[in-house]
Amino acid sequence: MSTVAELLNNHVTLAVECVDRVYLNGYVPTLQASGQLVTFLTRHRGNPIPSPALLNKMGQQFNAHLDQFAATTGLTPVHFKRKERKDDIAAEHRAKFTKTEGVYLIGVAQEKSNSFKGSTKHDQSCDFARVLVTYDRQSVFVNHYYYYFVDQDFGPGFIKVCSYAPYPIKVCINGHEWAKRQLDKEGIAYESLDNGFKSCANPDRLQDLCDDFGQKHILRLLDKWLAILPMPLTKEDRAAGYDYRLSIWQLEISRTQVFDVPVHGREFFEEVIRENLDLGRPDRINLLFDRKIIATTPGVFRTRVIEHGVHPSLHVEYKSCHVKQYFKENHALRTETTINNPDDFYIGKDLSNLPKLWILGAKSIGGFSTSNMSVSFAPCLRARWSQSPTRPSHPTDNGSLHCASTTLVRTRSGRASL
């Protein structure tokens, strides 16, 4: 009798595990408190008074550099409208970009930021004139600038810059796109599957490259583009200790299993859904995460099956973490773990913790592994695949799955309701 693992060994032509989307928060550790800002303006910049007008001057200089950069690259900044999908607009501009590297879009959007606001007042407690300057952090809507680029090592990505102090940034890249560029450099042929792989001439080398991806590559990318792009903080500022540190805002780890016959993968996935509708329950969540759920554990733990037409996807949630499995582009079984808050697992957000989060994400993906699943459907699939290898890869509406959900919600009292 065939096990599920044996079935996959016989019908999966490529299996790749890789970091997918990485969304990073960049901040300057020495510019987070009002006293640090005063030190920056006086001791570092050499101003006798830390006047708020100095920040306005920095903003003007930044805008001037941005205008010069836009003129040099021949780009006109695009002002994003509210609720407009920025990724769609970027994709349109990227399709027209023919260079191997460079910025292809500068976007501008008014977004909320926790920025410094300064105020001045005259001190009446002494005989001589004295001005008191104070700074505090406030939530304000300010301009953010999106630099969408194509990098020779990373492919497409973007860096978002806040124009107000303390000048935080966001960095968005994709590990699969990085791996593709490395294969190109080594002359290894492959076929893309959206942000993934459909085939590769050297699968072992591909997995080695994916395993090698890490902090050193990301920091090298950041240093490179900070030296190219207009930024509120100059290279002299960064050299003096006002440099960016990266933390993990969102991390996606994925496993892609490409089937020899697409219909086999679709049928396998539908059986997996039926076998794992209760995977998000507290008594089974430890298959995905090494966590014990008790009566006082806050959060929502649930399994959902969502259908878009005849394309179902399986979703398991643990706190702010999300594990998703679906059949990608009718060729591959894709399992993705999205970590939105490393604190859910008592792991720090600093980029140096990327290896720990990768191991955690890989374990959650392994929870969907067939070695942990019931193999009751293996004989059925074996017989079906051997008899009908050329069945259509798209089921009819009558054969599609109905939406199902298993949800456990923790109330404030700690009692569970299903």
Image: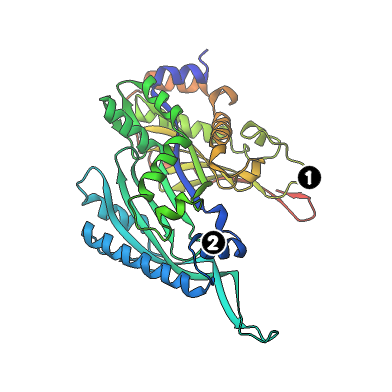
Q: Tag on residue 295? A: 1
Residue 8 occupies quadrant = top left
What is the x, y in percent for residue 68?
26, 63
The answer to whether residue 196 is visible is no
Q: Residue furthest top?
A: 1
What is the x, y in percent for residue 171?
43, 49
Q: Tag on residue 186? A: none
Residue 219 occupies quadrant = top left
Q: Looking at the image, is mark 2 or mark 1 nearer the viewer?
A: 2
- For label 1, count other residues whose C-alpha is less than 10 Å away and answer few (under 14), some (14-19) or many (20+): few
What is the x, y in percent for residue 143?
42, 67
Q: Residue furthest front?
A: 128
Disc with the residue nearer the chain's start (2 vs 1)? 2
Residue picked out by circle 2:
43
The answer to whether residue 285 is visible is yes
SS at mark 1 in the image: loop
Q: Could you tell me the amino acid type at mark 2?
A: Arg
Residue 356 in the image: above or below residue 418: above
